[in-house]
Image: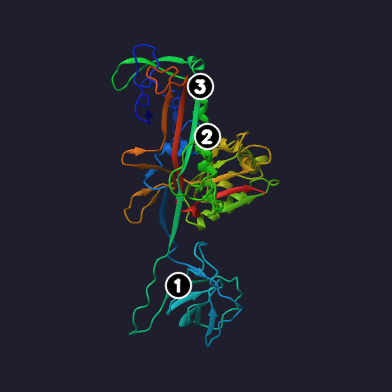
Amino acid sequence: MAYSTGSGYANGIPSAFQVATTENYVSTLNVHMPEIAEDFISRYGEQSLTGFLESVGADAPTAQRKFEHYEDDWIHQNFLQTGTPTIAVGGTTITLNNAYSSDGTAAGAFNVRLGDVIMNSYGELAICTNIPANNTRDLVPYNGAWTALVATDVLTVIGNEWHEGTNQPDGITPESNHYYNYTMIMKESFDVTGSEATNKTWFKVNDPSTGQSGYLWYLKGEADTHRRFANYCETMMLQGKIATNTNAALQAVSGTATGNSIGAGGITGSEGLIEFIRTGNTQTYSQVAGFNLSDFDAMIRTLDTNRGARENTIWAGIDLSLAIDDGIAAMFAGGGVSYGAFNGAEELAVSFGFKSFTRGGYTFHKKTYDTFNYLPMFGASGYNYPGMGMVIPGDMRKDSKTGSSMPSLRVRYKEAGGYSRKLEHWITGSAGLATPTNETDDMQVHYRTERGFEGFASNRFVLLERV
């Protein structure tokens, strides 16, 4: 019998007597309902990716294992040319660099049209008078000859100009960026013998839906199993990768696997939050110097260049979190730096051991992310996650078609025809249950989910890494 998260006690029905049934059983998730604290973003208890997403309602069903969306590109783009030409008064032909993309998503995705006005980094202007070939343009300067170009000089289109009586220019087809990811199936089970199943905890509750009181129970082992399963759900959404190995053990197969077979194909993987951010912006800082004011400024410039959110959360490992605290405290040590360094004392939420601050019009809320510090996993010896941080936008984006608000990230889970695989939870066996499901002298508690991470506009995120 499957249970789904709902109101009350996860559909558990209190009984008048202390008799264990599948109806009055509830998961520890519902027994120890965490207290929700009001903060920058409402979240459940411990800092976890899944808890954060669920607390803001950032999840959505998908009927297919592969889910996709499209994102707008820049409506203006710059470009590079090859060689070291000087745009002469009589005009010069330049060759466009097809390997360059101003946003890093589609090489050669530039549009320089007849009549376009081109500007270089020196403020000099030229107009495109002819298109000899797909990757070449004739430019004539507005004034004298241009300063000699090098291959790394970025050129940009700032507008166009036409003389009287001319036809309309060619149109530009907007570019879009294609995003896709996959859901992955994750499972966990807890098996207890009939003898061990007597280790129960009883407590009396009031059913909010009926007003009646009764008894519910849980097992300590099941509590640990649920916690481990929740951690796996979090870490796979955090560090997952799309499988690209051509080994047959991972490739899609026809038909359905049976039993506990693994290595028979059908493993797609799923891109997690960290890999998603790597497609956007990565910034390093010195392990020796720590994370100082210049690192903050570099991060702010990156966000500003990429139209980042004005309010962000830094989910930091313990080493980075302490380095940020030290960097801020050092600015005020001995009176060497005034509060004006952060545009006034009122803009610093807490001056020592701070949590929030504003600089350059950007607000940051620092959270120590326990997952990066957990010793058996990300915090193990030799792992760099305690020095890592994720800068996540705290605003909502708008769907350009519908105008609906879109989160910066969310979890997608399989659902179709009223059947949801967001989180399945059921019990089998004959031990300790009023209605056995089989003759085996044990009780098994099962968990299953099929979900994947989905991120939007990776250019608005920043991954901080220690070197």
Q: Position of residue 86 (x, y in %)?
A: 59, 81
**Image quadrant occupied by the N terminus:** top left
Residue at label 2?
A: 231
Q: Position of residue 25 (x, y in %)?
A: 40, 21
Q: Is residue 108 left or right of residue 167?
A: right
Q: Position of residue 378 (x, y in %)?
A: 61, 38
Q: Mark 2: which amino acid? A: Asn
**In the rendered image of this protein, does residue 100 appear above or below residue 446?**
below
Between 363 and 315, the one nearer to me in the picture: 315
Which secondary structure, mark 3?
Answer: strand
Residue 294 can be seen in this image: no
Residue pictured at 61% horizontal, 75% vertical: 150
Residue at label 1?
A: 111
Sequence-wise, the earlier of marks 3 and 2 is 3
Mark 1 vs mark 2: give the one in front.
2
Between 285 and 424, the one nearer to me in the picture: 424
Q: CA distance from mark 3 to mark 2?
A: 21 Å
Q: CA distance from mark 3 to mark 1?
A: 66 Å
Which secondary structure, mark 2?
Answer: helix
